[in-house]
Image (cartoon, rainbow, N blue to C red):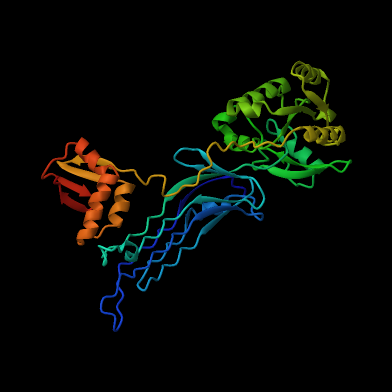
Amino acid sequence: MFVDYAKIVIKSGDGGNGAATFRREKYVAAGGPDGGDGGNGGDIYFVVDPDSNTLIDFRYTKTFKAENGQNGSGSHRFGKSGEDCYVKVPLGTIVRDAETNKVIVDLSQPGQKELILKGGRGGKGNSHFATSTRQAPRFAIDGEKGKEKELILELKLLADVGLVGFPNVGKSTILSRVTKATPKIADYHFTTIDPNLGVVKTEHGDSFVLADIPGIIEGASEGIGLGTQFLRHVERTRLLLHVLDIAGTEGRDPVDDFNKINEEIKKYSEKLAARKQIIVANKADSMQDDENLKKIEKIAKDKDLKLFKISAVTGEGLNDLFNYVSEILKELPKEDIIEVEDRIVYTLEDDKDDFTVEIVDGEFIVSGPAAERLMGRVNIGDNESYNYMERMLKKLGIEDALKEKGVKEGDTVKILEWEFEWYE
């Protein structure tokens, strides 16, 4: 099954906690602090899998987690870092942030590997906090928690040329005649419900990738008839072959079809609407007269578009068409069709100073990543650690924020699950 859209959750590993231990050894009367650091949490990477061409696996596995770092221990033993997690995706996958819908990365290069989410840093052991005046620190720093993100994966086919048009105009027949692809072909609408790819090799030895995009209908740009899913795959192409049924075999007007398809493309993307087009007047073998052909010839002339009259069934005009396409592709630049505005690697630095102060039932509630990280470093039962917390409240701006909210002597301040009585 061809699946081109998925929503998943990724979580980087938590950092291991630092150890608060002391050297305990025979004949050593006052061993110093020897707590080791915690290991870093594992990172999340996305990698292009050359053996995959669909996102179907993400229908069954929707959560990906990197391994947590191990805690440090005594004798300066560091915890082991967590294993990284590698998410394999097909070539042509776009990764978006589900919250902002921004493109994080475009995985359109063979062998591409991208770091998406960094793991939490391991905490420091108490051996880091020994000084000439504080020779036996009884506190260590907990590891930072990993981060969790919901992502959208979109697969956009990588093809040089896209066949577009209404259902049943002969796109699949064209693909089957000029490539080794074997799309399902029948005389009813939406025979093609999944995009198909094939490699065209011209008589001059040139080759390029041709995509048969399922029929686009009126309202496609708003998602009618899976339209936005179909249009997604046209975005990558450098050249569009607009296939029209000039025989009017189903009573359709090819001029009307031409205008409607282009209107849907324009609504979906102005950039896509500006892509170079060639009109392909198909089913020439079934024409009763040349009235429709003359109408299309006028449109081609008015819009300065190249027109080819063909019959996909008999093969008439196909060589001329694809030899011309091959030459045009040599002139069209290979551009980055998908614009990655801000290449994002989510790190724990993104929100390290974020906190909020709220008043609930007369209590001052402090929450947020900055508060979580601070309290993870504090041993409330240790005076030196408690003094460290007070200094950090001032340094992080939490003390000023509390004062702005009107905190005064004797008020209750709650930081996560710890409650304190405020004093100046």
Residue drawn at (59%, 36%) of the image: 339
Residue reaching furthest to the left: 410
- Give x and y (percent) for residue 160: 73, 38
Residue drawn at (38%, 64%) of the image: 37
Residue 118 in the figure: left or right of residue 239: left
Residue drawn at (64%, 48%) of the image: 91
Q: How many marks?
A: 0
- Give x and y (percent) for residue 279: 76, 26
Residue drawn at (18%, 51%) of the image: 419
Instruction: Work out whether 387 lies above or below 160.
Output: below
Residue reaching furthest to the right: 203
Q: Quadrant of the C terminus?
A: top left
Which one is in front, 19 or 200?
Answer: 19
Residue 383 in the figure: left or right of residue 261: left
Whether residue 393 can be seen here = yes
Which one is in front, 309 or 413?
Answer: 413
Which one is in front, 125 or 118?
Answer: 125
